[in-house]
Amino acid sequence: MTFAMRNQSEGTQVLVIDPDEKACKTWRWMLPQGEFCVSTTNQIEEAKKALQKNRIDLMIVDWSLLKENETALRFVQSAPCAWLATIETCEILEATTALKQGALDYVTKPFSEVDLCIQKLRKAAQMKQILDENRALQRQILKGSLTPYLQSQSASMQPVLARLNELLQTDDPFLLVGPNGLKLHLIAKSMYDLPPKKQGSFVAIEGELADEQAIFGPMGALKRAAEGVLLICHLDRMPITLQEKLACEIAHLKPKAGSTHPESRFRFCTTSVWDLHFLTATRHISPAMLGLLQENEVKLPPLSQRREDIPQFVEYFLAHHAPYRIKHVNRDCMEALQKAPWPGQLEALEQVLMEALAHQKGSELALKDLPAAFFNAGDHSAADAKPATDPSICMAIDLNQPFRDAQLQADHAFRAAYLRGLLEREGNVSAAARAAQMDRANFRRLLKKYLQD
C-alpha cells in the first residue's frame, strides 16, 4: 500500500482500491493536492487495515473486486465512509448494479475526462459531509429526548409517558413493570440522559447477581451511583434481606424536604415482570422496598399493544446497527414486522433485524431478507412447547417447609432445570444465551450460580 505523506487532517482523505497500479498512480496524479489526500492499495485486506488506522472520507473501488466477491462487497457497504465505483467503459451496464449496491457514483476507465472525475469526487465529498451531519443528528436523537423508548404514537403509551414525565421532575424511586424483552432498563437509562442530567453515574445491576459486596462494598453500586442513578433489574430476583437493607439506605440518602443542595439528589429505579400486587402476594418484595415504591409503579404495555411504534423502533435499530447501509424498508417488510406477535418484545425485534442485516444485500430491507425463524415463530413443535419435566422440580417441593422457604427451593430447582435443558437442547453457551434472550456474560454467571456441576 502507498500512503501520501500528508497530514491526515489536510483535505478529503481518499482511499483508492484498484488492482491496476497504473490506475492508482493516475488518481494520485489527477487529484489536486491540498484538496485531496490520496492513499492507494491493490487489495481489500489492506484496505481494511487502512480503515482501522486512518480517517477515510471516500473510497474509490474497482468494481471488478466486488462484483464476484460478496465478502468484499459487504465490507465496502458497511464501511463508515462513502464510496464510488470505477467501471471499465466496456462494462458500463455494471454501473447500475454498483449504484444499487450503495455506490454514490461511478467513474469510467480509462480516465479520459479528468475534470469530470474531479467534479464527481467533489460532489461525493459534499455528500459524505451531509451523511456525517445526518449521522451526528442520528446519534443526538439516539441519546436525546427523541429516543423511541420515551416517545410513542400509541394510545396505550400516553398515560405511561405522562407519568414518566412527572417522575422525571422528582427524585422519587419508581418501579417499571413490563414483559421480558421490553428493554425496561433502557427506558430508565433514557430518563437519566434527559435534562436535568444527573452529575453522577448511571449504575445498573441484576437483582439476581446482587450481593452485599456488589451493593454496599467500597466499590459497590451505591458508591458508584452517588449523585446519579441506581437501577436494579428484576427486583423480584433480589434476596429479601438485601432488598430491605437497600430500601432503608435509599430512604436515608433521599434529600430532605427544603434541601438547598441539589447535588445531593439521588434516584433509585427498578424493574420487574411482576406488579407490586403480585410481588407482595408471593413475598418477593420486602416491606421497606414496598413502602418505597408503592406510590410510583409504572406499567408498560407489551409491543403487541403498541404496533404503531414498531416502525420507529425498526428505524432506530437499523440506524444503530447499519447506519450507512439501509436507506429504506419496503412496505411489505414493514407490514410483516408490524403484524408479528412479538412474544419476545423489542429484544426479539432487534434480533430479527440483526439476522436480516447479516445476510442482506443492497440498501433496501425487503421481506425476503428476514430470517426463516421470523416466519416460523408461530409454528413451534410440540417438543419445543412442552414444559420441562425435570423431576428435580417436583422433588424440590417440600411440604414440610414454610411456603416461602419451599418456594425459594423450588425456584432454584426450576432455574437449574431450565438452564440445563437449554444447554442440552442448544448444544453450546452462545446458542443457549440467544434462546434465553440474554447476553452471554450474564448467562454464564447464572450457570455458575445454579449449575455447580
Image (cartoon, grey):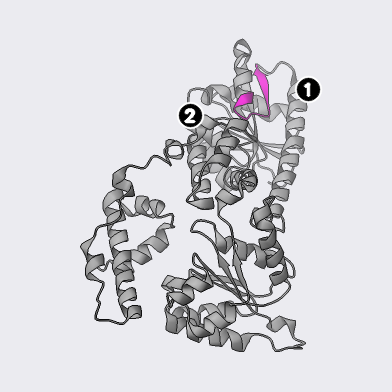
Q: Residue at x 61, y 67 (%)?
A: 298
Instruction: Say which quadrant the C terminus sits in.
Output: bottom left
The disc, 1 or 2, on the residue closer to the chain's N-terminal end is: 2
**Label 2: which residue?**
70
Measured from the top left, where is residue 214 in percent x and y?
Answer: 46, 78
Neighbour tally class for label 2: few under 14, some 14-19, many 20 plus, Cα within 10 Å: few
Instruction: Say which quadrant the N terminus sits in.
Output: top right
Please report contact status of discs 1 and 2: CB closer than 8 Å, yes or no: no
Badge 1 element: helix
Measured from the top left, where is residue 243 in percent x and y?
Answer: 48, 81
Tell which of 106 and 409 is nearer to you. 409
Tell which of 409 and 419 is nearer to you. 409
Residue 101, image quadrant: top right
Q: Amino acid at mark 1?
A: Asp
| Relative horizontal placement of residue 110, taking residue 303 as reference (left or right) | right
Tell which of 294 and 135 is nearer to you. 294
Q: Does residue 22 sit above or below 327 in this rendering?
A: above
| Relative horizontal placement of residue 181, taking residue 27 as reference (left or right) | left
Distance in Å between CA atoms under marks 1 and 2? 32 Å
Measured from the top left, where is residue 83 in percent x and y?
Answer: 64, 32
Q: Is residue 123 magenta?
A: no
Is residue 201 something one can see in this rendering?
yes
Q: Is residue 102 magenta?
A: yes
Task: Give the total number of marks visible in the rendering.
Answer: 2
Q: Which residues are magenta?
A: 99-109
Q: Amino acid at mark 2?
A: Glu
**Label 1: which residue?**
115
